[in-house]
Image (cartoon, rainbow, N blue to C red):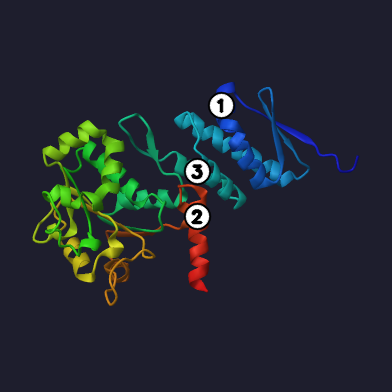
Amino acid sequence: MENEKNIYAIEIRNQEVLMEIVGRLDENLKIMEKSFGVSLRVNGLNLEIESNDEQKIRQIKELIDGIDYIIKKQNRIDKSDIYYLIKIIKENKAESIRHFIDQVIVYTATGKMVRTKTLGQKRYVEAIENNDIVFGIGPAGTGKTYLAMAMAVRAFKNKEVNRIILTRPAVEAGENLGFLPGDLQMKVDPYLRPLYDALFEIFGFDTYTRLLEKGVIEVAPLAYMRGRTLDSSYVILDEAQNTTNEQMKMFLTRLGYGSKAIITGDITQIDLGKGKESGLKQVVEILKDVDGIGIVELSRNDIVRHPLVQSIIESYEKYENR
């Protein structure tokens, strides 16, 4: 029959790997079938592709090779990894897969591997390694803050710095937190929760608590950085799109010897009041040609959250452009 499709088989090295590739309730297979418009089925240790399209067959083989490589590295595969692998394979960039997979930053308290998951994230981490001040700019879900945290923890564990300092503008309280109940820690907790969450996961709660009590980890609103000089420290300024020009200049001039500063933000999520210009937008233009400063722009292609996040951001961009 003319319309009869050929069957191509890919042999999987063992049952455990096959189960990871297929996914719970065949969810990974369904993602692959929908993405490439082919039928996939399992036959023993073989993954069979039903198609006459040689390009799709080649792409699926590249995808399985990439998935197998990730499983060898971390014993499992995330859906976010599969979505990103499919994307770069369709863009004929399969040769770049191992470049970002191999970039392991640190291990969490539970032994989970923290690594770059996209080419944009790889560029971001390399910029942090090679510069004393780095701006990571991009939409939600691109790993800006989490990777900065991971790099800070790695530097601390390698004794490259003595402290980790985390700060964030408390825009909703106008940087005036005095009316809130409790001590300083209680006042700033709601604004700094995302930073805490990342440190809890990487350090573990007990280690994090001990280091916080010793003053090795410091968490404070941006207003409390004024007048200080930060030596031998890894300083992370999160949500920097909500800084004013004056606040950004104040923060950058706090940097002392042996320190590194990572500034993260999303210029599409500015919460400043009317008439106030974002310090992040302006500083990128002012410092773009300064040696020792890295500026990395992450895009929706670097989003590693649920795939709907990328679709939501794309839809908002289209609406705003109209």
Type of amino acid at the residue the image marks with label 1: Val
Q: Is residue 230 left or right of residue 32?
A: left
Residue 18: image location, x then y, percent: 59, 27
Give whichever of 38, 249 is nearer the camera: 38
Residue 141: image location, x then y, percent: 41, 51
Give whichever of 11, 281 is nearer the camera: 281
On the image, which quarter does residue 58 sit in? top right
**Mark seen at residue 17:** 1
Q: Secondary structure at mark 3?
A: helix
Q: Secondary structure at mark 2?
A: helix
Q: Residue at horizontal 52%, vertical 74%?
A: 322
Q: Which residue is mark 3?
A: 80
Q: Residue at horizontal 44%, vertical 38%?
A: 102
- Cα distance, mark 1 to mark 3? 17 Å
Type of amino acid at the residue the image marks with label 3: Ser
Which numbered disc, 1 or 3, marks the residue closer to the eye?
A: 3
- Cα distance, mark 2 to mark 1? 28 Å
Q: Is residue 3 left or right of residue 288?
A: right
Type of amino acid at the residue the image marks with label 2: Gln
Q: Which residue is mark 2?
A: 310
User: How many numbered markers are drawn?
Assistant: 3
Which numbered disc, 2 or 1, marks the residue closer to the eye?
A: 2
